[in-house]
Amino acid sequence: QVQLVESGGDLVQPGGSLRLSCAASGIAFAINTMGWYRQAPGKQRELVAAITSGGVTNYADSVKGRFTISRDNAKMTVFLQMNSLKPEDTAVYYCNADVTDLLKRPVNYWGQGTQVTVSS
C-alpha cells in the first residue's frame, strides 16, 4: 500500500510561480512513472506532466516551457515547478503514481489533490 500526499497549492497572481510536492510513503517493489494531473471545475481531469523512474518526462502542450517536473527517487517525491502561471492553470492538482507492489502487480495510486488558484 502506498500513500501520496501533495502540498504546495496556493493562490498566486498571474505570472507568478508555485512548486508542488508529492511525497509517497508505504511499501512497494517499485514506484514507476509519477505524474501530475489537474481538474478544473466542469472539466475532465487531464495530464499535466509525468516522469519515469529513469527521468524521462512528458508534458501537456499547454504547460511546455512553463512547468518542470522532477523527482527524488531516494525520497520517493515528485515535484512540479510551475512558472508564468495563467488563470487557466487554476485547478485541483493531483499526484499519480504507477506502482509495482510486493507481489509484482501493477497498482495505480492517486493523492487527495491540492488547489492551485491563479487570480489577481
Image (cartoon, rainbow, N blue to C red):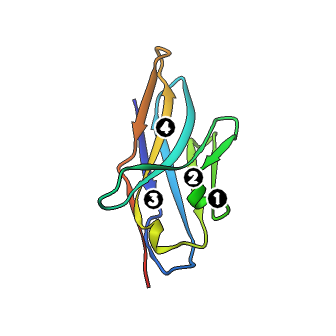
Q: Earlier in the sequence, mark 4 or mark 1?
A: 1
Q: Nearer the viewer, residue 98 or 41?
A: 41
Residue hosting label 4: 97
Residue at mark 4 to residue at mark 1: CA–CA distance: 21 Å
Instruction: Provide residue 24's location: percent of width, then percent of height.
Output: 48, 42
Disc 4 residue crowd, few under 14, some 14–19, many 20+, Cα 10 Å: many
Q: Does the residue at mark 4 contact the one at mark 1 (Cβ under 8 Å)?
A: no
Tell me the element at label 1. loop
Count of marks placed on residues: 4
Q: Earlier in the sequence, mark 4 or mark 3?
A: 3
Q: Is residue 19 above or below residue 108?
A: below
Tell me the element at label 4. strand
Q: Quadrant of residue 41?
A: bottom left
Residue hosting label 1: 64
Residue hosting label 3: 7
Residue at mark 1 to residue at mark 3: CA–CA distance: 22 Å
